[in-house]
Image (cartoon, rainbow, N blue to C red):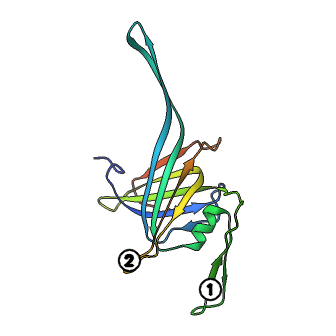
Amino acid sequence: MNFGQAAFGLKQVKLTDTAGSTPVFLPSAMMLHFTEKTMSTKFLADGLWIAGRTIPVGVEWELEAGGLSLEAYAKMTGRTATAVGTTPNRTVTMNADAGTEFPYFRIYGRALSDTGTDDVYCVLYRCKLQEIEGTFRNGEFWVSSCAGIGIDDSTFGLFQFVQHETKVSL
């Protein structure tokens, strides 16, 4: 098996603006899932399929992470997470107003190989949050989950996979 073919376990998820700057890492990243969406058609003539056409049009993605990162929440929604005070008395606050447009952002995900020496990562270049949720529940940890779409950014495309023979930081 070649390097990068046995990706095992999500190690990191990073969110940035669409320029790839101002990174925010998800705490306790648990899952990055995406589905490439296509538009397809078949040419049927004389009772037979003569040709077919499939064109990629976008991606749908989902994220899950343990904990509640207001900094990550703010990155995906265009809001501001404001920190005041010093440890051990810091407070982070994020306010939400109705009618505010969510921005586009990038998602980077990284998984190590089963040997831990190489890795594979993916980048979704132009993502838009469509839903976000989590539940405060007695006796359970908060798990943040969210989903959205990814569209072509006209420079890098929809997404990119990169395999490194020697693992690198995200």
Residue 164 location in percent, x, y?
43, 53
Circle 1 residue: 91
* Residue at image location 67% in from the left, 56% down from the top: 103
The answer to whether residue 119 is left or right of residue 157 is left
Label disc, if present, on residue 5 of the rendered structure: none
Marks 1 and 2: which is nearer the front? 2
Residue 47 location in percent, x, y?
38, 10
Residue 33 location in percent, x, y?
43, 53
Residue type indicated by callout 2: Glu
The quadrant where residue 52 appears: top left
Circle 2 residue: 140
C-alpha gap between disc 1 and disc 2: 23 Å
The single residue placed furthest to the left in the displayed view is: 1
* Residue at image location 58% in from the left, 50% down from the top: 125
* Residue at image location 64% in from the left, 62% down from the top: 77
What element does badge 1 sit on? strand
Residue type indicated by callout 1: Thr
Residue 78 location in percent, x, y?
68, 63
